Image: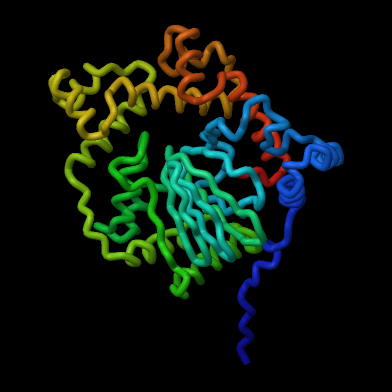
Amino acid sequence: MIHTSPPDTFEYLIEYDEIEKFYKAYHEVRHDKEKLQKVLKMTGDLRQYLLAEVFEEDLGELKVRTLFADRYKHDITIRKHTRYSPDLAHDHTFFEMIYVLKGKADNTIENKLYKMSDGDICLIPPNVFHKLWVGDDSVVINIIMKKSLFDENFLNEITKGSMLIKFIKQNLYMHPLGEKKFLMFHALHNAPLRNLLAVLISESFKGRNSFPVKKALVIAIFNYLANLEDYDDEVSEKNEVIHSILEYIQRNHACVTLSDVARHFNYSEPYFSKYIKRLTGMSFVNILQTTRLKEACHLLATTNMRISDIPGKVGYDNVAYFNRVFKQKIGTTPYKYRKMHRNAMLNDMGGLNLQL
């Protein structure tokens, strides 16, 4: 007689961990100052929590940029989204697949709310502001995929010509191109796809957490997603060109100029200036500034480099000008940005479940 193991019931994901217990307690008393103070006093090191009471900034207004993808050791990381954690607007350098395993979630992308429920899957590319709220016993899974995962060999394994593969290629660099800021799929009744996701989750939490196994499962999941819808979008030649241009700017952001890029792609400088604005909706100066600021955020969050050295490293000769632009675009000072993200990094290293 062949014994078949029962399917994973994911009871270990339904249970609340200590971080979730605190956030839930905080959420329930946050409007009662007296009760809130009691909850905070009963808690140890508050730096492990992203709360307005901990950080000087008003976290409800600050755009939190979790750009330190280096915090993840592997190209694929599977995490449970922390229930009741503050729904702070943030972006990051990796692709994120949000999967509602059980229940529901409020997913806000570029200030627009999308209600997700059982079986829903949302693929969010790098550099798109979003926030996720899970305020009950629902279980939502974050599948984090670093850009380095999407090499030529990996992409060749996904259905060619699909909207999914086009979407990934278009969003590997800089900022999302076109109108599609994310892809949403409804897989409630797609048993094979949900079974693949279940195996991926089980492998990550209760199995060997083998990268080759996870990679094979992610490829299979992408291929199922690629065939869920019959998209008729076509990736035009101009998007392939822009992909190359943005990649070139990103690689050479510290010293590149408009004339350098125009010359590299065999355009005249005046024509290229208008051409890139027409294709991306952004001027070359804005694209370069965005690239440099993102690299500055990355260095602030993941290195011990002196803050005064970072402007020159990313292409700014004037430190005062850099500080002014950083505050204007990021919403806080370089010092406060590092302080906030350094606390988050320290707590991740301690095994805490801090996740935006």
Q: Position of residue 151 (x, y in %)?
A: 37, 46
Residue at 67% across / 40% down in the picture? 348
- Give the camera-side residue of 131 and 158: 131
Farthest residue, direction bottom: 1
Residue 280's place in the image compared with 108, above or below, is above
Residue 126 placed where, x, y %? 43, 41
Q: Quadrant of the C terminus?
A: top right
> Where, by quadrant of the figure, is residue 57 drawn?
top right
Position of residue 331 measured from the top left corner of the image (x, y, whole percent): 52, 25
The N terminus: image quadrant: bottom right
Q: Is residue 188 above or below residue 22?
A: below
In percent of the image, x 69 and y 34: which residue is there? 346
Please state which of residues 109 and 342 is positioned toward the viewer in this rendering.
109
Give the colouring mode of the picture.
rainbow
Residue 281 visible from this viewpoint: yes
Name the residue at 42% across, 12% down. Answer: 316
**21 on left or right of 105:** right
Q: Residue at x 33, y 23 (%)?
A: 286
* On screen, residue 350 above or below 82: above
Q: Quadrant of residue 337?
A: top right
Say left or right for 115 vs 39: left
Image side of residue 32 versus residue 268, left or right: right
Please tell me in which quadrant of the rendered image residue 261 appears: top left
Q: How many marks?
A: 0
Q: Is residue 147 visible?
A: no
